[in-house]
């Protein structure tokens, strides 16, 4: 890919900067609120499954470390950081940056879908925790996809970008499984090897990876369609 090909999708919409800013602000609000709640231990965990993270006696440092190991937090932080960069410079581009931009849409979508379809039934957040939970699992995922649909940037997705977009999620998965094998505790039930065994966990992981691949292909198709419509407008 030449440097010239990296600069084709221009100009950026006049709506881009304010929408990027709103997206970043919402993502940061959820991340920061959840971090404060976690650090202070405001709402003690009601988790009763020993092999799922959430020990009320682990102290602030333990809670903070656990906080940064959740896929939900990783995806929301990625959205907050990348959308902040786009807000500061809507023309920002680059090979790795294109991968990270796709990751924001892919990972936050997986976060929202997996939580709302699989995990929400076992979750009972209260007070500010409920607000943070809603921002991270519902508002930010929906807003991030909408902003991407409206202002893109367009023309950034291709097979190489799609392939590289799996690096970060797979790295998280490897970390979660290795750490879980050491401490016998996992961030989510579907990767809980202690309870489910490696066979079931691998089936769950393959299912989510296939789902993520389908999402990426949908995003690629939508990107091509929206880019074509914009060029004809």
Image: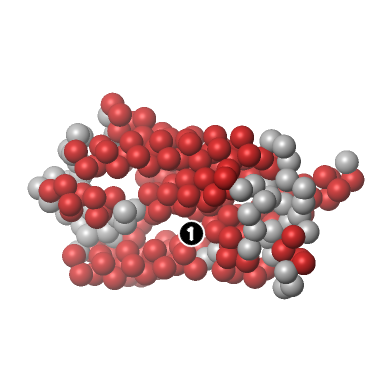
Q: Is residue 47 left or right of residue 150?
A: left
Q: Nearer the viewer, residue 208 or 26?
A: 26
Q: Position of residue 103 (x, y in %)?
A: 54, 57
Residue lying at 24% horizontally and 50% vertically, measured from the top left: 64
Q: Which residue is mark 1?
A: 208
Check the image and name the residue furthest to the front. Answer: 88
Residue lying at 83% horizontally and 50% vertically, measured from the top left: 228
Q: Nearer the viewer, residue 41 or 112?
A: 41
Q: Does any portion of residue 134 appear in the rendered image?
A: yes
If the image is split into quadrants, where does the N terminus sit?
bottom right
Residue lying at 18% horizontally and 53% vertically, measured from the top left: 62
Q: Is residue 173 left or right of residue 146?
A: left
Question: How many numbered marks have been drawn onto this rendered protein structure?
Answer: 1
Classify 174 as above or below 85.
below
Dot 1: what SS? helix
Q: Position of residue 52 (x, y in %)?
A: 23, 54
Check the image and name the residue furthest to the right. Answer: 232
Determine the image quadrant of residue 29.
top left
Q: Position of residue 126 (x, y in %)?
A: 27, 29
Check the image and name the residue furthest to the bottom. Answer: 1
Residue lying at 74% horizontally and 72% vertically, measured from the top left: 2
If the image is split into quadrants, where does the C terminus sit?
top right
Q: Is residue 46 left or right of residue 110?
A: left
Classify 99 as above or below 59.
below
Q: Does any portion of residue 225 appear in the rendered image?
A: no
């Amino acid at each position: 890919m030449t440097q010239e090909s990296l600069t084709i999708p221009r100009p950026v919409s006049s709506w881009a900067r304010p929408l990027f800013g709103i997206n970043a602000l919402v993502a940061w609000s959820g991340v920061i609120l959840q971090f404060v709640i976690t650090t202070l231990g405001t709402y003690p965990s009601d988790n009763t499954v020993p092999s799922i993270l959430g020990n009320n006696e682990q102290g602030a440092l333990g809670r903070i470390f656990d906080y940064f190991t959740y896929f939900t937090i990783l995806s929301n932080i990625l959205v907050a950081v990348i959308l902040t960069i786009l807000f500061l410079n809507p023309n920002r581009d680059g090979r790795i940056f294109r991968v990270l931009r796709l990751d924001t849409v892919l990972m936050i979508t997986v976060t929202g879908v997996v939580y709302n379809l699989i995990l929400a039934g076992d979750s009972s957040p209260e007070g500010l925790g409920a607000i943070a939970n809603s921002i991270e699992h519902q508002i930010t995922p929906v807003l991030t996809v909408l902003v991407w649909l409206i202002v893109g940037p367009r023309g950034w997705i291709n097979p190489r970008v799609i392939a590289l977009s799996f690096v970060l999620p797979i790295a998280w998965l490897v970390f979660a499984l290795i750490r879980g094998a050491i401490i016998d505790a996992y961030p989510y039930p579907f990767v809980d090897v202690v309870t489910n065994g490696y066979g079931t966990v691998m089936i769950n992981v393959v299912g989510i990876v296939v789902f993520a691949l389908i999402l990426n292909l949908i995003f690629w198709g939508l990107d091509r369609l929206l880019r074509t419509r914009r060029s004809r407008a």
